[in-house]
Image (tube, rainbow, N blue to C red):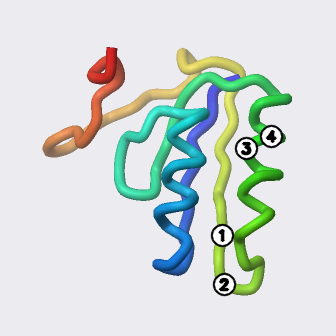
């Protein structure tokens, strides 16, 4: 599946969540990730995140699609981290 993950966490947890998400998805913007991921890997990511997030203060938003082709992406301004830039 293709996902877009967005998070809003307290500053002391930002670095930890950034490192975790980078292991599974492509970083495209501050606190925003996207990419192909299996159900198993997504559950793994979310379980690891749940181990240090505070559900009263932090949030993760997850947008899912079967494939990237069903999404239309428009970038206005400079794309912070375009797909393929890490290859």
Quarter residue 82 falls in: top left
Disc number lying in front (2 or 3): 3
Residue 9 lies, with reference to residue 39, above or below; the image says: below
Instruction: Indicate which disc, 1 or 3, sits on the residue closer to the N terminus.
Output: 3
Q: Residue furthest bottom?
A: 56
Residue at disc 4, secondary structure: helix
User: How far apart are the alpha carbons under marks 3 and 4?
Assistant: 4 Å
Contact between marks 1 and 4 (CB within 8 A): the answer is no
Residue 30, image x, y percentages = 36, 56
Name the residue nearer the viewer: 86 or 74. 86
Residue at disc 3, secondary structure: helix
The 10 Å Cα crowd at callout 3, few under 14, some 14 to 19, many 20 or more, is some
Residue at disc 2, secondary structure: loop
User: How far apart are the alpha carbons under marks 2 and 1?
Assistant: 7 Å
The 10 Å Cα crowd at callout 4, few under 14, some 14 to 19, many 20 or more, is few
Residue 78, image x, y percentages = 15, 42
């Amino acid at each position: 599946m293709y996902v877009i993950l967005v998070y809003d966490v307290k500053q002391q947890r930002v670095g930890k969540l950034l490192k975790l998400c980078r292991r599974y998805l492509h970083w495209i913007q501050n606190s925003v990730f996207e990419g192909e991921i299996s159900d198993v890997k997504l559950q793994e990511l979310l379980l690891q995140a749940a181990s240090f997030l505070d559900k009263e203060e932090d949030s993760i938003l997850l947008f899912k699609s079967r494939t990237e082709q069903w999404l239309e992406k428009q970038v206005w301004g400079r794309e912070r981290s375009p797909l393929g830039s890490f290859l």
